[in-house]
Amino acid sequence: MYHTDFWQMMAGHDVAAFRARANKHSREAARIDPNNVEVQVRRAWCRLREGEWRLAQEGFERAVSTLPHDADTINPCAAGLCYLGELAQAETLMQRVFRLNPFPPPIITQITPSCSCSAATLSEAEEHFDVSGEVGILYLAARLANLSRLGKAGARVAVAVRPAFLHGFKQRGNLRARQQQTTFFNGLPTQSRSGSRHTGGVCTAD
């Protein structure tokens, strides 16, 4: 749900239809059970995508304050705050997640590098990528973008990571067209740059 429009479009999806459907269902869920924390988190994500950034941030913060010791709730809220440019707040929440659950599922170790490389702590981001063991094309692409900023040390690691990314890349039928592949690779460097507040210019931006 937190992937950017860029990634979804490259996979051949109708992003506008996805957003509209998510809004419709999350609004209905909020009408049925407005106090449900999971629903609040989903509504916050929808508001983020609609550009309602203040309401999105308030939604994430409200969910965290309601369940401050629930790692599964804090995790997506931290990712959302990262997208909003609240990098320090997001990083603090992710560290809380690791304290609450020292052996988290892969999805948590996948999101943490997003906060780290967005905050320009590139080496720390690579450590998280390495520990997560995630081999999905989205995360391999973000990892390669991050490695490109780590000089010779990053280049050595990239040699081992690149084949797995290319294998996954070639398996996606919607990505085989040369024009789409060129767009994809041209977009990678911009994905590794730290963005200004509320621009969405973060490493993965789900």
Image (cartoon, rainbow, N blue to C red):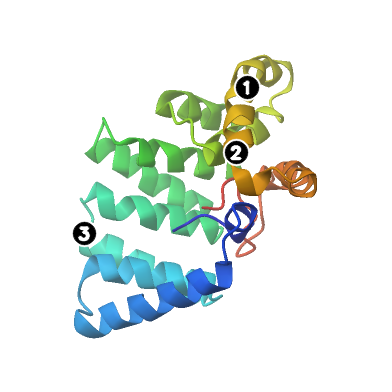
Cα distance in 3D space between marks 1 and 3: 41 Å
Is residue 148 left or right of 135 when viewed as pictured?
A: right
Q: Secondary structure at mark 1?
A: helix
Label for residue 67?
Answer: 3
Residue 163 marker: 1
In front: mark 1 or mark 3?
1
Could you say whether the residue bearing mark 3 is in a helix, strand or loop? loop
List the residue tagged with mark 2. 142
- Which residue is painted at 73% across and 16% down in the image? 152
Image coordinates of residue 141 in percent, x first then y, are 61, 37
Left or right: residue 64 versus residue 195 is left
Seen at 45% across and 59% down, the residue is: 80
User: Is 13 on the left or on the right of 102, as rendered?
Assistant: right
Q: What's the residue at 40%, 46% (across, down)?
A: 92
Height in image: 41 above or below 148?
A: below
Which quarter of the image is occupied by the N terminus? Answer: bottom left
Query: Dot 2 surroundings within 10 Å: few (below 14), some, or many (20 or more)?
Result: many
Question: Quick one: label 1 or label 2, which is nearer the N terminus?
Answer: 2
Q: Secondary structure at mark 2?
A: helix
